[in-house]
Amino acid sequence: MILLMLCTGVDAWAHNVAEGDKGYIQESSGILIMPFIYLGAKHMVTGYDHLLFLFGVIFFLYRLKDVGIYVTLFAVGHSTTLLFGVLTGITADAYLIDAIIGLSVVYKALDNLGAFQRWFGVQPNTKVATLIFGFFHGFGLATKIVEFEIAQDGLIPNLLAFNVGVEIGQLLALGAILILMGFWRRTGSFMRHAFAANTLLMTAGFIFVGYQLVGYFVALSNSLFGE
């Protein structure tokens, strides 16, 4: 996953949307349920930030009940701020939001490594953290959608359809991850390689953060001094 992220170019990172999808969103008008379900599912399945975070969340979850709880918390947070941001038009700087999303990946990797317990003697509430980072993931996507100036005609049905697509995409991606994790956990190498896997996960998160901060300062410089 990390190699794909590095090889597909910066335009695919975080909440950037493919040019064709962006044009469709900007030009569409009226209620378009199925196309927006497709766009939502596509965004989740190809969203490396979401997939890496979910990978970290379920890394040490063995019971489907626990997986369901955490994924539901993430979905509630993501859906809430996605709808709120688009319907109210409230946004934040996309680079800074995506940097926080990168930090969510770093946090989960450190949590899996037991770093907070060793360093500070405390264990953050993982359920609360998953919900809060879900808020940021949804707000980041809302910020991008608002930038596209989506048509008001059919806005709410289309947003709801998009959100349904996101959840469908999340279930598909999660199913694939769980199947692969199931095979890996049956091998003797799982616990031996868990440290290395979460170190790579943390590295990917820091790469996200660095990329977004560079983009933020470049954009800030261009706005202050001109391109």
Image (cartoon, helix red, strand yellow):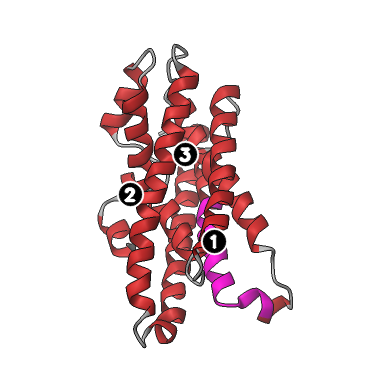
Q: Which residue is mark 2?
A: 10
Q: Distance between the Cα atoms at labels 3 and 2?
A: 15 Å
Image point 64% across, 63% down: which residue? Answer: 126
Image point 59% across, 70% down: which residue? Answer: 111
Q: Position of residue 40 (x, y in %)?
A: 38, 36
Q: Position of residue 78 (x, y in %)?
A: 54, 42
Is there any visible trace of residue 225 in the rendered image? no
- Disc 2 is placed on an element classified as helix
Dot 3 or dot 2: first in sequence order is 2
Determine crowd level at label 1: few under 14, some 14-19, many 20+ residues with C-alpha closer than 10 A. few
Vertical order, 223 against 206 (above or below): above
Q: Which residue is mark 1?
A: 65
Callouts 1 and 2 close, C-beta under 8 Å: no
Image point 43% across, 20% down: which residue? Answer: 150
Q: Distance between the Cα atoms at labels 1 and 2?
A: 36 Å
Amino acid type indicated by mark 2: Val
Residue situated in front as seen by the camera: 219 or 167: 167
